[in-house]
């Protein structure tokens, strides 16, 4: 089995920080809601309690709308008092306290004014089995599978491995991504009930464009500034790796090419790569507030990458101060060079036959 537990991969920035700085991801999730609704309308069930899994929930805020939508549609079909179980999963290091707080207090919580809904959470990597066989009707999985299960290699020339100039390094990433995609699909296929659906949304790439150049490039340059000014050595810079990477349509389809369109009993019902919304650009155009734009994008970058970067540093150093300085420098760089954030979203709906 793939290993994540002992690796440098961290969950999102805690104390609810990810919930407050993930409007880009929320806007991406909204793009997939039509397809998710279609899945909820078509999945077959009997008179059993209905089970929805949320694979990689983080702190929960961005799950509220998709889960509420699924519950509404399933209950329109099954009756308004049908028991629904919702199982959120994430890494053991995830800030589950914020998730449970959001279930109670977030105005968008699917628990608001609801009865007969039973939420729970599992703190374990999804590169292991998480649920009993054939128990899940609908699986939601957003913005997680870009995280590799392990760091396959370190790159001397970028913090994001797919940005390295070395084709050997990029190949190592592609190999790990292919293994991870197959393992993730195989495990989820075992957990879905026959006719169940799994929606997976993650950063996509086009044959000639990967997106993310600007923000990932500025983070790399901020690290290099710190190397130049002293706080980080070459060796530390080599070890600081955020193991995330986008997938192409060909990557998504690859496992399904071998057995008449099926993989592990799953068929692709929908797969596309769409331009991702830039949630901050309109405000910037209206106000010209480069510092505000920098705060917004630095928050997003920090929310997903700071714990992993912290884990890459020697615990004997003042890691909080170093990481704080890194994101201050990132904010300065973004404010000095405001751009549109180009990115792409892959939306994949899988059907268990
Ligand atoms: C960017 S957040 C996405 C949160 C939420 N689904 C959303 O749409 O905003 C990515 C989440 O994936 C989780 N994650 C990464 N690798 C994982 C793994 N192997 N098993 C479970 N969760 C994982 C991270 O801990 C993090 O909470």
Image: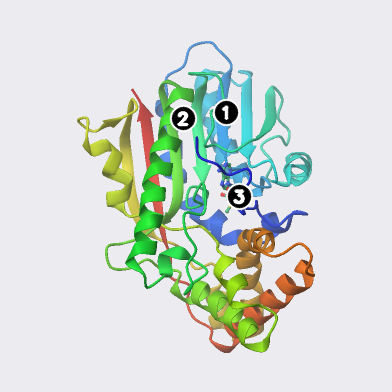
Judged by depth in the image, the label closer to the viewer, 3 or 2, is 3
Q: Is residue 131 left or right of residue 307?
A: left
Q: Residues within 10 Å of mark 1 (few under 14, many from 20)?
A: some
Q: Is residue 191 left or right of residue 174?
A: right
Query: Alpha carbon of mark 2 to alpha carbon of mark 1: how far?
Result: 8 Å
Q: Which residue is mark 1?
A: 130
Which residue is nearer to you in this view: 137 or 190?
190
Q: Check mark 3 vs ligand 1: CB closer than 8 Å? yes or no.
A: no
Where is residue 58 shown, x and y percent of the image? 64, 47
Badge 2 vs badge 1, beta-carbon distance below 8 Å:
yes
Q: Is residue 73 above or below residue 81?
A: below
Q: Going 47% across and 52% down the picture, which residue do you hit?
A: 146
* Residue 185 point in image, percent of width and height: 41, 35
Residue picked out by circle 2 = 187
- Secondary structure of the residue carrying numbered label 3: loop
For label 1, the SS is: loop
Q: CA distance from mark 3 to mark 2?
A: 21 Å
Instruction: Compare marks 3 and 1 and give the one earlier in the sequence.
Output: 3
Q: Residues within 10 Å of mark 3 (few under 14, many from 20)?
A: few
Q: Is residue 297 left or right of residue 103?
A: left
Identify which residue is drawn at 37% across, 34% down. Answer: 350
Q: Secondary structure at mark 2?
A: helix
Q: Quadrant of the C terminus?
A: top left
Residue in the image at 34% along x and 27% along y: 264
Q: Badge 3 is on which residue?
A: 7
Q: Nearer the viewer, residue 93 or 344?
A: 93
Q: Can the viewer see residue 5?
A: yes
């Amino acid at each position: 089995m793939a290993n994540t537990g002992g690796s440098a991969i961290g969950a999102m920035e805690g104390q609810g920080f990810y919930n407050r700085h993930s409007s880009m991801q929320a806007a991406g999730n909204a793009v997939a809601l039509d397809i998710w609704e279609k899945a909820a309308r078509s999945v077959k069930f009997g008179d059993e309690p209905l089970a929805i899994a949320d694979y990689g929930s983080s702190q929960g805020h961005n799950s509220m709308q998709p889960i509420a939508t699924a519950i509404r549609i399933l209950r329109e079909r099954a009756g308004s008092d049908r028991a629904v179980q919702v199982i959120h999963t994430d890494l053991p290091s995830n800030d589950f306290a914020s998730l449970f707080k959001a279930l109670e207090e977030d105005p968008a919580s699917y628990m608001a004014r609801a009865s007969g809904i039973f939420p729970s959470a599992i703190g374990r990597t999804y590169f292991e089995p998480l649920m009993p066989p054939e128990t899940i009707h609908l699986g939601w999985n957003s913005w997680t599978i870009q995280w590799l299960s392990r760091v396959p290699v370190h790159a001397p020339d970028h913090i994001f491995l797919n940005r390295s100039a070395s084709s050997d390094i990029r190949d190592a990433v592609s190999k790990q991504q292919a293994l991870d995609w197959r393992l993730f699909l195989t495990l989820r296929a075992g957990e879905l009930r026959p006719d169940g659906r799994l929606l997976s949304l993650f950063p996509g790439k086009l044959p000639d464009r990967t997106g993310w150049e600007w923000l990932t490039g500025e983070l790399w340059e901020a690290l290099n500034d710190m190397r130049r000014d002293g706080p980080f050595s070459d060796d530390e810079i080599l070890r600081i790796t955020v193991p995330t990477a986008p997938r192409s349509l060909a990557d998504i389809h690859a496992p399904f090419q071998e057995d008449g369109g099926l993989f592990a009993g799953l068929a692709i019902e929908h797969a596309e790569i769409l331009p991702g919304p830039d949630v901050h650009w309109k405000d910037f155009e209206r106000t010209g507030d480069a510092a505000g734009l920098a705060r917004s994008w630095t928050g997003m970058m920090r929310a997903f990458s700071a714990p992993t970067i912290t884990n890459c540093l020697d615990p004997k150093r003042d890691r909080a101060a170093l990481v704080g300085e890194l994101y201050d420098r990132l904010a300065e760089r973004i404010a000095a060079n405001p751009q549109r954030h180009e990115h792409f979203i892959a939306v994949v709906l899988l059907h268990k036959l």
